[in-house]
Amino acid sequence: MVESALPSTIPGSNSTLDNTRFIASDLCAYLETYLEPEQVREVYRAYLFGAEAHAGQTRLSGDPYIVHPLAVAKTMAEMRMDHKSIIAAILHDVMEDTHISKERIAEEFGQDVAELVDGVSKLTHLKFRSRAEAQAENFRKMMLAITRDLRVILVKLADRLHNMRTLGALRPDKGRRIARETLEIYAPIAQRLGMNAMRRELEVLGFAAYHPLRYRVLQEAVGRARGHRKEVMQKIEAAICARMEEAGIVSRIVGREKNLFSIYRKMQQKQLSFEEVFDVYAIRIVVEDVDACYRALGVVHNLYKPVPGRFKDYIAIPKANGYQSLHTVLFGPHGIPIEVQIRTEEMDRVAESGIAAHWLYKAGDRHSATAQARAREWLKGVLEIQQAAGNSMEFLENVKVDLFPEEVYIFTPRGEIMELPRGATAVDFAYAVHSDVGNTCVAAKIDRRLAPLSTRLESGRTVEIVTAPGARPNPAWLDFVVTGKARTAIRHYLKNLQQNEAADLGRRLLDKTLFSAYGIRLEEVEEARMRALLAELQLPDQETLLGDVGLGNRMAALVARRLCREDGDPAGSEREIPPGRQERPLAVKGTEGMVLSFAKCCHPIPGDPIVGVMSAGRGLVIHRDKCRNVAEYRDRPDKWVPVAWSDEVEQEYAAAIRVQTANKRGVLASLAAVIADMGSNIENVSFDERDGQVSTITFTLSVRDRKHLADMMRRLRRVPEVLRISRARC
C-alpha cells in the first residue's frame, strides 16, 4: 500500500497525523481505480511535500491546512483528472501561503505542475489600492493562465467548491463577499465550461450564504410542496416509460428538480410567484443515439401536446459550451407544464462534466472534444478582451458580461452559424466576425434588408455587414453593444484614436506657442532639450507629452517655456518674448476629432468670433467670445487659447434659435417645412408656452455658417405666425 511510505518526520500530533494520513490514503485508493501505480506514488509524494510545507498552519475551522488541498484533490479525482492536475490541487496554496517558490515546485514535480500552481496562486507580492482592484487583477492573471492550460480553472473551481462547503467558519461579512464572488464569477464560469453539476452546487452554496433568509424560506416552501409532486412525477414518468417501450426505444428516464437558486432567479427575473415556478415538472430522457433522440421527441409529443414556440434543438446547434440536448415543454395531465430534455449518454456526461469530460472519457468521445474546443474558442475571445482592456477592472467587467449568455444563433452569408448573447446587435456580430470588420462597419443587412447597426438580432437571421475603408467606431455604439469583445474593442480604438488626435492638437498648440513666443518651430527644438524635459517630467516619449498638451493636462505655454529656458536656468524661469511678435490664433477646421469640442451653451458656428478654453482630460472647448461661461477664464491666460475659423471649414454645426409664435394649429409644421427647404436638419426642439396666445419654440439646427443661419432666420420671419426670432444666448 502507498500508505506505508509515510515517514514519521511529518510535524503534528498523532491524531492530526492519523487524520491526514487517512484522507491521503483514501484519495490514493480512489486514484488507483484509474491511474497508473507510478502516478499514484507521485501524488502521494506531493501530499508529503505539501504537508511539510503547510506544517503548523490551520484553517479557521481548526483543521490542519493540508486537509483543504486534499479535499480539492479529491474533487479533482472525482472528475477523474490526470495525475498532474491532482498534484497541482494538493500544492495549489504552497506558493501563496508558504516559502515554497515556483522554481522549487518545477524542480520537484516538473514545469507543467509549477505552471498550474502559479496560475491558481494570487498576486500576494503586489500592493493594490482596493480589494476590488486586487480581485480584478488576480482574476485577470488566472484567466491568462487558463488560456495556456484549461486545467487551471478546474483546480480553481474545485478550490472554490471546498471553500464554499466550509464557509461557515468565516465571519458573516467575509462569507457574503466570497458567496457573491462565487455567484457572479465562478458559477457562471462553470456554466460557460459546461460543468453543470459543479455550477449547481456552487449556486446553491452561494445562495445559502449570500441570502440566508431567502434560502431558508424557499427551502421550507419546497419541502412542503414536494410530497404532492412526487406522486404526480411518478405518474408522468410511468406514462412516458410505457410509451418508450411501445416504440422500442431503450431509455433512462430521470425526474429533475430545479435547485433553489434556479427557482429564486426565475422568480426574480420573470416576476413569478413560488407556485408559478415550482408548478413546472422537469424530466430528462437519456437514450442510446441521436436518431433515438428525435424518435423519443415524437413519442412525447404524441403523448402530451407540446407548447408552441418552446422547442429548442441544441443537438443540431449546440450551445457555446458544447451542451447538446433537445428541449421541449409539454401540456401534462391537468394542464401541468412538463419540461423535457432528451439526450444521449455521451451528451449527458458532457452536460454534467463539461470540459472535464475530455480527461474523464478520452477514448472516442467526440462530444467532450467539441466541448473543450468551444471552451478554447471562448478563452481565445477572453484573451482578445484582455489585450484591448485598459485595466484589470475593465477586463473583469467585460468578462462578466460574457459569462451570462443566453444565446441567439445567427447565420453568416455563407451559411455558417455564429452564437451571440441574447440582445446582441449588428455591431456585436461585426466584432464577433473580426475586430477589423467591427471597426469599419457602416451598415448591416438582415435577411438581405438594410437595418440600423443598433438592431437587436434574433435567432435564425442571416446578417451581412457592410464596411467602408475610412469608417471608424462611433462612441454611441457603447450605449447598445452587449458583448465584452465589442465593448473592449470600441473602447480600445477610441482610446488610441483620442491619444493620436490629442497628440496632433498638442503638436499644433505647442508649435504655435513656440513660434509666437520664441520664434522657433517645434521641429527646430534640439533633441537633447526635448529628452531632458521628458526625463524631468518622467514621460516615455514625445507623443505622450504632446497628448497631454492636447488633452489640456499640460499647458503649451509652460512646456514651451521649459523647452526654451537657458541652460542652468531654474525650471520655472521665463525668457523674454521677442518684442513685436504677434501670437497668431490657432486655426479651427472642425475636423480635429475627439479632443476638440464645441460648447453646447453658446453653439459657436463658422463666422462667429470664438475663443478656446483648455479643459483637463477633454482638450480644447470652443466658445463664442461673448459666452458668459468663459468670463471666468479671461484672467487665466494659461487656460485661454486664441483661435479662429479656418478657411477650409466644410462640415455642419449646431446653432440654437428662439422663435416666438402665435399659438395656432400647424405652426410647427410650417416652421419645419421652411427649415427643411433651407437645407437644414432639426436636431432638437423644445416648447415654452408663455400664455394661451404666444409660444416660444427653441430649435437646435444644423447650419454651415453664420450666413446660412441668417438666411434661414430671414425666411422664418416671413411665416405669418412668427412674432419674433433671435439666436439663443446662454
Image (spheres, rainbow, N blue to C red):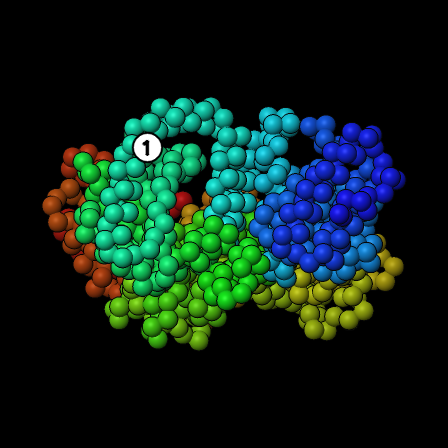
428 sits left or right of 232 in the view: right
Of 317 and 661, the residue lying toward us = 317
Counting from the top left corner in percent of width and height, residue 226 is at 35, 29
Of 22 and 550, the residue lying toward us = 22
Q: Is residue 57 above or below residue 77?
A: above
**Residue 662, quarter of picture:** top left
**Number of callouts:** 1
Decide: few, some or many residues near mark 1? Use Cα within 10 Å; few <14, some 14-19, many ≥20.
few
Counting from the top left corner in percent of width and height, residue 405 is at 42, 52
Q: Is residue 530 above or below residue 17?
A: below
Q: Which residue is mark 1?
A: 230
Of 511 and 495, the residue lying toward us = 495
354 sits left or right of 271 in the view: right
Question: Residue at the spot x=70%, y=73% of the render?
Answer: 523
Q: Is residue 170 above or below residue 512?
A: above
Question: Residue at the spot x=44%, y=68% of the render?
Answer: 433
Q: Quadrant of the C terminus?
A: top left
Counting from the top left corner in percent of width and height, residue 447 is at 26, 68
Of 437 and 198, the residue lying toward us = 198
Q: Residue furthest left?
A: 665
**Residue 712, quarter of picture:** bottom left
Question: Residue at the spot x=61%, y=45% of the render?
Answer: 75
Q: Is residue 717 visible?
A: no
Question: Residue at the spot x=40%, y=23% of the render?
Answer: 220
Q: Amino acid at mark 1?
A: Lys
Q: Is residue 569 visible?
A: yes
89 sits left or right of 210 in the view: right
What secondary structure is found at the residue carrying circle 1?
helix
Counting from the top left corner in percent of width and height, residue 696 is at 24, 42
